[in-house]
Image: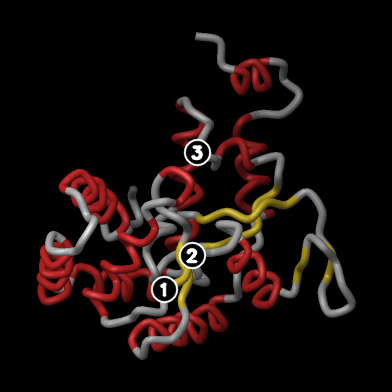
Amino acid sequence: MRDSYEQLFSRGLISKDQLFEFGLSETIYVDVKKAQIEWESLKDKIQFGQEVFIRGFGKNAKGTHLFQKFYENLIGNDNIVKDPTNNAIPTKLLRKWTGYSKSGGNSFKPIRNYQISHVFGKTKNVYCFTAPWNIVYVPKIIDPFTGHEAQGSYVDEYAQLFKKETFKRFRTIIEDFNQIISNTEFQSHIKTAVGLMRYEKGVTSNDIEKLEKAIKTEFSPIYENI
């Protein structure tokens, strides 16, 4: 197996440890105190039926309506909206929360060659897609180690370090997220919400199967040692 990352490190221009340290130290996070405030705000929006965003579900986002109906059944919020570009709202929020912007502007400090990343994924989960602890700016040079298309041991190693560092930074908030989704009553509501969808017009057994599989991933807890 020829791994281009391995080829890079073998030339001695930069070591794996140096590159990984650079990636972790140069990642731009939301300030922890601000993140706590925005996390409480997000929970309130979800609870009180205000507009909240998720990424599209399924090929060409054609299954997004399944998650929207699921949330209506689960939390009584029928104001769950698909992000227009699958990253527009996190981009806007991260710019506001950090003060940094890739597009510049008088109100922000300009940055270049950074990429927005969802650290833990879960982009169809309303508690995660716009969560201040889940979206960061990563240096583009390190993005190949965090993207979905990358594979291999180096990718796995960096991903684990990246998630562990983020968990440590936002431990209290992430543990609150875990408590919400792991609560016995909440888990019971998930089963009920999915069950109700079996009676929805136009929803097939295949739709339910795909939705249940996605929910299992989207609503799994986040731990420090992933």
Query: Residue under circle 1?
Result: 80
- Near mark 2 (Cα within 10 A), the count class, few <14, some 14-19 or many ≥20, is many
- The label shown at residue 170 is none
Q: In the picture provided, is 18 more to the left or to the right than 217?
A: right
**Residue type marked 1:** Ile
| Name of the residue lying farthest toward the right | 106
Q: Where is residue 73 drawn, in percent x and y? A: 22, 74
- Helix, strand or loop at label 3? It is loop
Residue in the picture at 82% in, 74% down: 108
Relative height, residue 142 to residue 91 (above, below): above
- The label shown at residue 148 is 3
Residue in the picture at 55% in, 40% down: 147
- Among the two numbered marks 2 and 3 on one chain, the one whose residue lies closer to the N terminus: 2
**Residue type marked 3:** His
Residue in the picture at 11% in, 63% down: 195
Q: Where is residue 91 drawn, in percent x and y? A: 65, 65
- Helix, strand or loop at label 2? It is strand
**Residue type marked 2:** Lys
Q: CA distance from mark 2 to mark 1?
A: 7 Å
